[in-house]
Every structure is written in structure tokens, then in C-alpha cells.
Amino acid sequence: MLTRAEALVTDAGWSSELAAQRANLFALAGRADDARAAAAGLVGSDLDRVAVRAASGIAIAGTLSGRFGEAIEAATDAWRRQRHLVDQRGFGSSGFHVVTRTLALIEAGRLDEARSLAERAYEFTIEAGDGVGQGWLALARARVDHANGRLTTARSWAMESAARVR
């Protein structure tokens, strides 16, 4: 489907966004090197929609491949840019980038920073009534507690996450 769309789209901005989406799909499939290649030249684009999509793929790919600094930077940039997009069509919540940043921080061993971010973001989802966000942030909190050896607490957060996303 993406290949057919790329063949039909002639606008340079939309073509770039499709290329950035390919980076996301590669990252979600665990193909970090392919994601990085697909996003080359698109991260930091002057077109915010393109930059957000490309950074999403790089955040996931960076975490998968141990490039944690790259992942954290990409997730932070994507969050900042998406919050200011006028046209949000085709995007999920900008909170997705908070989750990818938190997971990269955990894998990087920056557990205090990850815990602080996950706690603040989780509280925000409660205030906003965002059950899906609560599920994702509960999962992030479970991962932080697991990495810290707090297994009982991690289990509790994991159970909450599962209950929220049903």
C-alpha cells in the first residue's frame, strides 16, 4: 500500500512524509538499520510533519539498536514538534513520544530520569482522562520498576497497563 501511494503522490512534502512513515514501519518491524536508512535526511526536516514521522521511527530504531542518545533526542524533538502541528491528521497522541523517550531512557540506564518522566506523564494522563495514555505510561512505569528490581511494584503497574488497554 505504501509503495503504491509513493508512486502516485507527486507533492514533495507528502512524498517525504510517506518516506518517513516507511521508517516507522521498519522500526516497528524491528528493522532498525532499514528504519535509519529510510529516515536519513528526514529527521530535523523543515516540514514538521515529516520530522515528527521520521523522528518516531528513529526513536524506536535507536532504542532497538542501542543508540539511546539518538533515540532520546529524536523522541524529544518529535514530542515538541507534534504538539505545535496545526494539522494533526494521521498522528496519534504526542504522548507516544513521551513513552518512546521513557523506554529509551530505561534502556540507557537513566532510571531516575525515566521514573520522573513516567510519573509526571502518568499523572497528566489521569488529569486528561486519557485511558490509553494511562495504559502506556503504566507499562513504562512497570519497565522502570522492573529495571530497578522492584518486581512486585512492576507487576502491579503491568497489570494496570493490561487492564487499561483492554
Image (cartoon, rainbow, N blue to C red):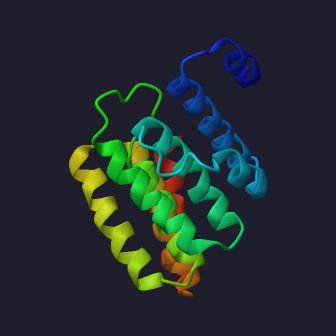
| Image vertical order of residue 22 relative to residue 105, above or below | above
The front one of 81 and 133 is 81
- Residue drawn where x is 63% and y is 66% of the image: 63
- Is residue 51 visible to the viewer in this orientation of the structure? yes
Q: Residue furthest top?
A: 8
Give 94 or 9, whichever is nearer the viewer.
9
Q: Quadrant of residue 143?
A: bottom right
Which residue sits at x=72%, y=16%? 7
Q: Nearer the viewer, residue 114 or 9?
A: 9
Image quarter of residue 3:
top right
Residue at far left of view? 127
Describe residue 64's horizontal placement relative to residue 88 as left or right. right
Residue 60 screen position, x and y as percent: 61, 57
Q: Is residue 155 visible?
A: no
Relative horizontal placement of residue 99, taking residue 20 as reference (left or right): left
On the rendered image, what quadrant is the N terminus found in?
A: top right
Q: Is residue 96 left or right of residue 5?
A: left
Tell me which residue sits at (47%, 83%) in the image: 111
Image quarter of residue 12:
top right
Q: Is residue 51 above or below residue 15?
A: below
Residue 141, image x and y in percent? 46, 69
Q: Position of residue 58 (x, y in %)?
A: 60, 55
| 127 relative to 121, above or below | above
Q: Number of marks in the image? A: 0
Q: Position of residue 55 (x, y in %)?
A: 52, 51
The answer to which of 75 and 19 lies nearer the viewer is: 19
